Amino acid sequence: MNAYITEELKKLKDAGLERRLRTITGPAGPRGIISGKPALIFCSNDYLGLANDPEMKRAAIEAVENLGTGAGASRLVSGTMQPHTLLEARIMAFMNAPAALVFNSGYHANLACITALAGRSTDVFSDRLNHASIVDACILSRAKVKRYPNGDIGALEGALKRSTAAQKLIITEGVFSMDGTLARLDLIVPLLDRYGAMLLLDDAHAIGVMGKGGRGTLEHFNIKRHPLIIQVGTLGKAAGSFGAFAVASADVIELLVSKARAFIYTTALPPSVCAASVKAFDIFEQRPGLRERLWKNVSRLKSGLRQAGISFTDSGSQIIPIIIGQSNEAVRISRELLDRGVFIQAVRPPTVPENTARLRVTLSAAHTQDDIAYALAAIEAVFKEGAAPARGATPARGAAPARGAAPARGK
């Protein structure tokens, strides 16, 4: 093997940063078979449990039967099919937006929007905790990137005041994917007109979840749609499907169609994926009880962690980080939880800052109260000082491992 590759692999392993793929047997959902044994899954982004929803599956199957399995080309060649235009119209209606464009993933969407809107004459103001796709897109755009501390609106405004660029673009996640905290859009949006800036809002973890109708963090903060805001959402999280979208003014969407390389140079989404996504927006409107159930589950888990004395970031979202610190320790705890039948993936640098490796716990509307009780008992047992994993335990519904003493905070 190449010496460089051998050395890089060794460095990753020694630092606890080696990655391994885990195959889950069964559909996406709150439980599955992992490494040959049943486990409850508390690290998925399927927040409303739609990835295996019967209505979603019927919509996808019908599209396959009528339109086949692939689009055959990029959207600007021969790949724009009726399901693509129907999905964009459905997104516009749901989001109350003048125009929409569908992309093949959230990564594609951020790459497309940022590189099309920013260039050498642009100052980009990017939150330090923004997603890797935003970081990569900013580099590719060749813009001057000014990163501000997470959520520090004073630092953001100071940087805007000092900027003399003709084009200014603020970029933030609505719900930060690894911390679960919310951007202060109520303070950011007023800066747009004040400093002549645009805002790209990555609302991947908010669409379907945040706001009374699930329209994201703008709705959560009761902010009206603004012509200087481009809002990006994904279809593979709360929507239970695949792909992403951007909603913005008609001029912005027209620019993206003509200039966004990540849109232009890739084969279009399969029609079945678009059909399932259309159904997801129907469900967002017709089944608000899913959001209500999700937030009840979030409240139940947070309450249980507090009772157990386990420190976590009370983020205000469905993402609940338990900060461990060292990568090897986070991996160990994740492994011992899986031995007890609870799958919570360890998240390590560079996904999160150094010395903040964590368990990123996420909730779904599909989790039952028994599921949450079982997970809480397993977390408490593993965090208890010196607890050995209960190998062979399985998360039968309603069952829970024996609860031990509360762990020391911050372990």
Image (cartoon, rainbow, N blue to C red):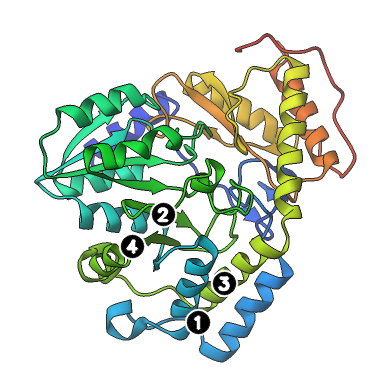
Query: Mark 3 or mark 2: which comes first in sequence?
Result: 2
Kindly check if marks 2 and 4 are in contact, taking CB atoms under 8 A apart as contact: no
Pick the residue in front: 115 or 284.
Answer: 284
User: According to the image, label 2 marks what residue?
Assistant: 232
User: According to the image, label 3 marks what residue?
Assistant: 278
Q: Amino acid at mark 2?
A: Val
Please tell me how many numbered marks the rendered image carries: 4
Q: Amino acid at mark 3?
A: Val
Query: Mark 1 or mark 3: which comes first in sequence?
Result: 1
Mark 1 falls on what kind of element?
A: loop
Query: Mark 4 or mark 3: which comes first in sequence?
Result: 4
Give the mark toward the camera: 4 or 1.
4
Residue at the far right in the pictured view: 398
Mark 2 falls on what kind of element?
A: strand
Q: Position of residue 37 (x, y in %)?
A: 74, 46
Query: Mark 4 or mark 1: which comes first in sequence?
Result: 1
Position of the N terminus, as image quadrant, is top left
Residue at the far bottom in the pictured view: 66
> For the residues marked 2 and 4, what is the alpha-carbon distance in whole angstroms?
13 Å
Q: Residue at x 60, y 36 (%)?
A: 317
Left or right: residue 159 versus residue 177 is: left
Mark 4 falls on what kind of element?
A: loop
Disc marking residue 69: 1
Kindly check if marks 3 and 2 are in contact, taking CB atoms under 8 A apart as contact: no
Pick the residue in front: 258 or 241.
Answer: 258
> For the residues marked 4 and 1, what is the alpha-carbon distance in whole angstroms?
32 Å
Kindly check if marks 4 and 3 are in contact, taking CB atoms under 8 A apart as contact: no
Reply above or below: 384 against 204: above
Give the mark toward the camera: 2 or 4.
4
Give the mark toward the camera: 2 or 1.
2
User: According to the image, label 4 marks what residue?
Assistant: 249
Q: Residue at x 54, y 77 (%)?
A: 272
